[in-house]
Image (cartoon, helix red, strand yellow):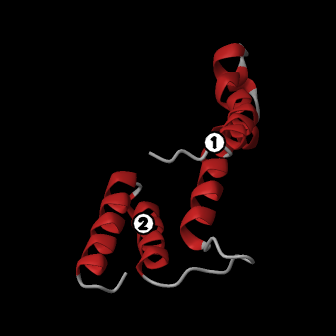
Amino acid sequence: MNIALGLIPLSLLMWAVTYPSRALPMLAPGIERLPNWAISYLRLAGPAALAALAATGCLLTSDSPPHLQLGAVPIAVAVCVLITWKTRQLLLGVGAAVILVAVARAAGAA
């Protein structure tokens, strides 16, 4: 099994960057008194960082220099985002994206 050990420092960095915003409600009493925009920011900081990492992994090639990937994967990402946005159900969006990529690969298009 090949494990990319170079990603361990990146994962530790992402943990260090996103953990304070996720732990703040547990560690700071009275956080509910913050303005709504601040609470929204703290709730969305971790998912936004993870989404940025996932988007670059799905939408960019590993070539040098990287360029946009074409095919079923970017379409599946768009379908996932659209379904999740419309229904507010992440499982439905991810399920649709997985099925789309599976069908495309079975058909030889991906």
The quarter of the displayed image where residue 73 is located? bottom left
- Pointers 1 and 2 in contact (C-beta within 8 Å): no
Is 69 placed above or below 97 here? below
Answer left or right for 4 relative to 35.
left
Looking at the picture, tell me which residue is in the foreground, 64 or 80: 64
Q: Residues within 10 Å of mark 2 (few under 14, many from 20)?
A: many
Q: Is residue 89 visible?
A: no
Residue 86 picture location, percent across and down: 42, 65
- Check disc 2 and report the residue beneath it: 80
Residue pushed farthest front?
1
Looking at the image, can residue 57 be seen? yes
Residue 24 higher or lower than 76, as above or below: above
Q: Is residue 96 above or below residue 40?
A: below
Instruction: Please indicate whether residue 48 sits to the left or right of residue 107 in the image.
Output: right
Q: Earlier in the sequence, mark 1 or mark 2?
A: 1
Q: Secondary structure at mark 2?
A: helix
Rendered-image quadrant of the C terminus: bottom left
Q: Is 15 on the left or on the right of 88, as rendered?
A: right
**Along the line of sight, which residue is nearer the eye, 47 or 103?**
103
Location of residue 61 by image quarter: bottom right
Residue tagged 1: 5
Give me the residue at 68% from left, 45% from top. Answer: 6
Judge by depth and name the residue closer to the eye, 29 or 98. Answer: 98
Which residue corresponds to the image point at 63% horizontal and 64% vertical from the top-left?
Answer: 56
The location of residue 36, given as percent across then percent down, is 70, 39
- Residue 12 position in % (x across, y down): 70, 34
Instruction: Name the residue type under label 1.
Output: Leu
Q: How many marks?
A: 2
